[in-house]
Image: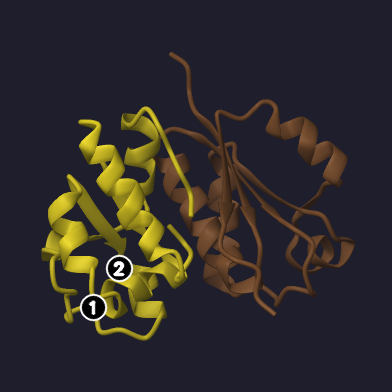
């Protein structure tokens, strides 16, 4: 059986929090689900529930990446460059721009 | 759908897809849950599309009372992110706005 591989690309701080939950929902539906926090101002520190969501996603073989070092260090996200993300997207069945850019 | 400002396109795409004989499911999450309360055409969308649902957790986070069910929706359509997964699993085409 072929499983869907989905990458959600987050465009702002608050949609990142929702989008990780969405990735978790997809993982529960037996998909490989990933998220990537795109360039943006520094994120806020995850609360306990948000950190748990990330942990559960990783338990289901998903992950969340970020393109900035500050966001990776703050919330224990996997670092990824735009070039590496581009390569990764080639392997996806679905690519989902998630949320809108906010000032 | 995550965007609060693109409802007219959701309506247009849904009408076009239905005119071609396709099944359409629309799922609103995060900022886009404002559409359910603020767009006058939302009840019509619920009639035209085969399935419309919203993320109830997002709806709550956007400041709405989860018992205040938007016109056009049934309580069971105030749902979870699993609805998003169903679209990806069960439909041939997927569009994110």
Instruction: Report the quarter where the C terminus of chain A lies.
Output: bottom right
Q: Residue at x 29, y 42 (%)?
A: B16
In the rendered view, would you say B71 is above or below A79?
below
* Residue at the spot 73% in from the left edge and 65% down from the top edge: A75
x and y percent of residue A89 in the render? 69, 34
Q: Which residue was labeled with disc 1?
A: B66
| Label 2 – label 1 distance at C-alpha | 7 Å
The chain shown in brown is which?
Answer: A
Query: Residue B87: percent from the left, percent from the top?
Result: 34, 40
Who is closer to the viewer here, A19 or B22? B22
| Position in image of residue A17 (x %, y %) | 56, 67
- Give chain B's shade: yellow
Q: Residues within 10 Å of mark 1 (few under 14, many from 20)?
A: some
Name the chain letter of the residue that bears numbered label 2. Answer: B
Kindly identify which residue carries mark 2.
B56
- Which element carries disc 1, helix, strand or loop? loop
Residue found 26% across the figure and 47% down from its top: B15
Residue at 88%, 61% (x, y): give it: A69
Q: Nearer the viewer, residue B1 or A55?
A: B1
């Amino acid at each position: 059986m072929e499983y869907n591989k989905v990458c959600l690309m987050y465009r702002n701080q608050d949609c990142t929090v929702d989008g990780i939950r969405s990735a978790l929902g997809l993982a529960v539906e037996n998909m490989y689900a990933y998220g990537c926090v795109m360039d943006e101002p520094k994120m806020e520190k995850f609360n306990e529930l948000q950190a748990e969501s990330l942990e559960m996603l990783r338990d289901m073989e998903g992950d969340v990446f970020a393109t900035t070092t500050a966001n990776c260090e703050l919330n224990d996200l996997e670092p990824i460059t735009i070039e590496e993300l581009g390569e990764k997207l080639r392997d996806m069945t679905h690519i989902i721009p998630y949320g809108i850019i906010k000032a | 759908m995550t965007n609060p400002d693109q409802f007219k396109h959701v309506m247009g795409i849904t009408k076009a897809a239905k005119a071609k004989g396709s099944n359409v499911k629309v799922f609103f999450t995060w900022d886009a849950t404002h559409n359910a309360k603020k767009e006058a055409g939302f009840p019509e969308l619920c009639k035209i599309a085969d399935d419309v649902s919203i993320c109830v957790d997002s709806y709550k986070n956007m400041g709405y009372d989860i018992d205040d069910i938007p016109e056009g929706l049934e309580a069971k359509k105030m749902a979870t992110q699993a609805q998003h997964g169903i679209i990806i699993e069960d439909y041939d085409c997927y569009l994110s706005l």
